[in-house]
Amino acid sequence: MDLTGGSFAPDAASACRACAARSAATPPRQTAQERLHRLVAAADAGPLRDDLLEALRNGAQVNPWVVGVSADRARSSTRLHEAIEGRDQASAALDAGGTFQLAEVATDACRFVAIIPTDARPVIVRRSSRRRAAPERPGWTFTDAREAAWFGVGSAGGTEHALDGAGTLCGIPPARVTAQLHLFTASSGSACPSCAALAAAAPTRPCAQERLHTAIATAAPGPLRDDLAAALTRGAEITLWIGALGPDLAKHYADLDELDDNRAALAAALAVNEHAGLAHVLHGSWRSTVLLRDGEPPLIARGRT
Ligand SMILES: [Zn+2]
């Protein structure tokens, strides 16, 4: 018997009658959606699981579905840092080691990743499906986007005062109040009236785009800086802004292999074992990556989305 390419067609004139009958009686293969549905049903009950099951019943695309993935590779390809839901459980499952199946399911609203250990229950992560810049926001400005000022709470004698670094806004030194672990709420019944009035009048804080725009002013001049600066003034979305040691940023957050411009410089800078900040910004057809370090100018790299 010679093997030929293609699949067996039972109604072809040259088809063996017995094979045609057996093939017609063979149950159809389950779809990827059906097979994944069966596996995911064993995950912890909750809205995240139910949303994924529903997406699979609705025929959402499963792609890719890979098996035998190491924990390290799973962590980076799952993009845990972009997770909207399920990050902690997924991180714990990956910390347990072993190999995993990873299946991604895309819907219009989000992207699910099912992480399926060999002998434990699957865990699910939900990410934003968008890896590309949103349309620009006409009329968006730093001024409109400023955020209300916020203060800590220093309590004294049952009254809550608004606390900043230098003491309470009404002038009590920090040593005379007890710092609390929540933010000052001017409308609270126990709020000091002077602090409430001063907090309401306090200047607003710059939004993340404005802060990053200020931070990159000292980066090397050129299109990487200027394109990003212009995009930030138009409200470009900052999808990540995180602080960690350079090598950890390189391993889990920097997505070095997706960079087109300045990849080598960023990789070299992240090899330094010091704390640094890393931000991702989506704009136009780019995702820019900004590295912020103490005592060094910011470094900007970018890749096409
Ligand atoms: Zn006060």
Image (cartoon, helix red, strand yellow):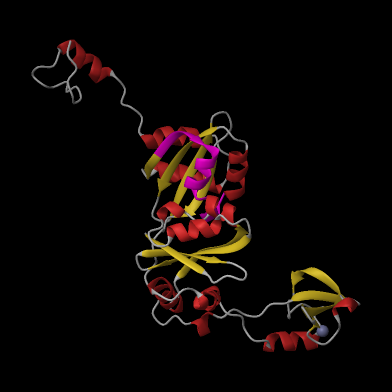
Image quarter where ligand 1 lies: bottom right
Identity of the residue drawn at 59% across and 57% down: 272
Q: Is residue 195 visible?
A: yes
Report the label total. 0
Q: Position of residue 158 (x, y in %)?
A: 88, 76
Q: Nearer the viewer, residue 196 or 133?
A: 133
Of the 4 image quadrants, the one containing the N terminus is top left
In the rendered view, would you say 69 is above or below 175? Answer: above
Q: Quadrant of residue 44?
A: top right
Q: Position of residue 18 (x, y in %)?
A: 19, 10
Identity of the residue drawn at 58% across and 53% down: 247
**Image: magenta residue range:** 65-86
Q: Quadrant of residue 137?
A: bottom left
Q: Position of residue 296 (x, y in %)?
A: 57, 70
Q: Nearer the viewer, residue 273 or 258?
A: 273
Q: Quadrant of residue 11?
A: top left
Of the 4 image quadrants, the one containing the C terminus is bottom left
Residue 174 lies left or right of residue 245; in this view the side is right
Residue 235 lies left or right of residue 19; in this view the side is right
Q: Residue furthest left?
A: 13
Q: Is-magenta flag for residue 195?
A: no
Identity of the residue drawn at 39% across and 41% down: 64
Q: Position of residue 246 (x, y in %)?
A: 58, 57
Q: Is residue 41 visible?
A: no
In the rendered view, would you say 303 is above or below 171? Answer: above
Identity of the residue drawn at 55% across and 52% down: 85
